[in-house]
Image: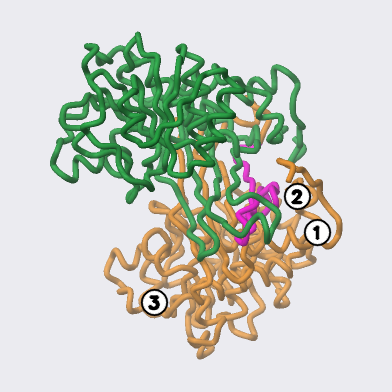
Chain colours: A orange, B green
Amino acid sequence: MKTLLLKKDEVSRLISVTEVIAAVEEAYKAFSSDQVEQPDYMGIDLPSPRGEIDFKLGYYKANEIISMKASSGGFIDNPTAHGVPNGMATIFLFDARSGALICVMDGSLILGLRTGASGAVSVKALARKNATTVASIGTGNQARMQIRSINEIMKIEEIHAWDSNSDTLFKYKTDIESELGIPVIMANSKKEAVEQADILVTTTRGKGSLVEAGWVRPGTHIVAIGTDQQGKQELDPEIFRNAKLVVDSMAQCTEKGETWHPLNKNIITKDDIHGEIGEILLGRKPGRESDDEITIFDSTGMAIQDNTTASKIYHNAIANNVGTFFQFFEQ
Amino acid sequence: MKTLLLKKDEVSRLISVTEVIAAVEEAYKAFSSDQVEQPDYMGIDLPSPRGEIDFKLGYYKANEIISMKASSGGFIDNPTAHGVPNGMATIFLFDARSGALICVMDGSLILGLRTGASGAVSVKALARKNATTVASIGTGNQARMQIRSINEIMKIEEIHAWDSNSDTLFKYKTDIESELGIPVIMANSKKEAVEQADILVTTTRGKGSLVEAGWVRPGTHIVAIGTDQQGKQELDPEIFRNAKLVVDSMAQCTEKGETWHPLNKNIITKDDIHGEIGEILLGRKPGRESDDEITIFDSTGMAIQDNTTASKIYHNAIANNVGTFFQFFEQ
């Protein structure tokens, strides 16, 4: 039995943004079609200045691949003390037909890629067809990933960006304009940015103050990325009162997503959640139904997104003879 | 960052039975000293003729290593359909100081090694010092591992062995006599073997009929290996009524070990459990206190045994320049 080993730079060359978007769309559909098993994750919390290490398992029945992602984060002393990043990730793929370990790949790019693609998939399903303007609240790495992905499926004419750190904001403007040629307007306030948005993307990890309900224009599609655990929040829960709310996973979003906050405040009930994005992609539920609707996509992230993305990378590697085979035992 | 890759044949050359015994003893002590975190395992059950794949996580604070064992079993078509064994295992080691993946090793030998050593550790703590005779109920691979380990820590003068399959029994006799030079008497019944035992080792995976209470002589030490999940059983629960019962993990044994059966029948209560083997090894509780006691060690197996065993293999590999380094990303 041979196991394919893939380095980070190989992973980066083996998949395009378009392919990640397709993989994430497949993941959402599979999840809403009973094609997925995702047991509760396992994790170890380490004392400060270390962070945590998590293990997330996903089985996709249609491709017969089981993925395990080991990811660490929050080890703030790593660069100085150990010469490695604050967080690292590795993805292990098993052939579910035999149980064999078929691939070990660096996973540090995959979280960013598949999370970036999640917003784009929701834009396809929920944004106005005549949307041209994106507001970006947060301008870090994931904000860039969102723009790269959304730009694959529509023409972004301008970006209104805001960040609590003005240096970060300026760097984002410079990077996006040179990489993608999209003009970036640096907003003086969140309000200024949000008021311009056809599509609003929040990627602040829920650590800042909130986007207020009064700022959001009718017809806006909101991509809520930053809240994936209890204690994080990016949106005024009042925004949810009259919006069409779509989640990646009903179970996760109601427990630890942005959706938890309006539920907790009794602004909405679970019955007010329109559905999972997979249900819309499968045609079981409508997406946007008018140009005036405010739509919200709450993305908490799922193991099956890692699975379909890493599986595509693996298959591309095999097809292109990229990577190193290692035989852990003779057969 | 570099990750060490170890093949099965390298693993087999990198650790001795004596070192595994020491590693398992360390694991038990660590477990009873709050030095261990072992979250609930994750698993995927696949439809027949496939089996299951499990992921077991263990963090040992003293050595700052986190181990994850991925193991599959019960894929009965694997040899013919896929050219791989029914079950496979891989162990992943992470440096808990940084979260880095430091080692990926074939794990197919480790379960057998560390389980084999568990019986030997219990013999040190609980068997009579003048014990010479072992009865082996079950004569498969794990029965051999038990004998190899126990033989490291005492002189076994003869083995009385029984198996439901007489061919398997004869092969065991031939193998053990040629490998270790210990005479093996093939018993005509379980009773015949058990009645001769100073030390009784049961490794039938709990699929056969039971060892009856009336057969067990005073002073016998029983190593109960085969019951590690609900539905398995090897011992008449009446044996527990007047025995000194020691477990590897209180939580596991009362839920899915041999210990569950007498608890379920109200033959004993949890208060009748003498303690965990780690408590005895640490000197917090007495081991055997008289030559007449019947002692029972109920072994269900713990992730921390994989951790300490695999960590020793890893350190031996580094010290001896064995294995292949692979760099998943440049730093």
Residue A4 shows which numbered tag? 2
Q: Residue at x 80, y 51 (%)?
A: A10
Task: Please tell me whether mark 1 or mark 3 is closer to you in this view.
Answer: 1
Q: Is residue A165 left or right of residue B143?
A: right
Q: Is residue A219 left or right of residue B324?
A: left
Judging by the rendered image, the residue that carries numbered circle 3 is A273
Q: Is residue B89 left or right of residue B164?
A: right
Residue sitting nearer the eye, B17 or B212: B212
Expressed as whole percent of the image width and height from the top left, the position of residue A253 reads 42, 64
Judging by the rendered image, the residue that carries numbered circle 1 is A318
Q: Residue furthest front?
A: B188
What separation in Å lies between label 3 and label 2 (alpha carbons)? 42 Å
Instruction: Give whichever of discs 1 and 3 has the lower sequence position.
Output: 3
Per the rendered image, the range of residues in magenta is A85-111
Expressed as whole percent of the image width and height from the top left, the position of residue B75 reads 57, 56
Q: Callout 1: helix, strand or loop?
A: helix
A233 lies above or below A122:
above
Q: Residue at x 52, y 67 (%)?
A: A36
What amino acid does circle 3 point to? Ile
Say which quarter of the image contains residue A62.
bottom right
Q: Residue furthest bottom?
A: A290
Q: Is residue A106 magenta?
A: yes
Say which quarter of the image contains residue A272.
bottom left
Q: Is residue A48 magenta?
A: no
Mark 2–mark 1 CB contact (< 8 Å): yes
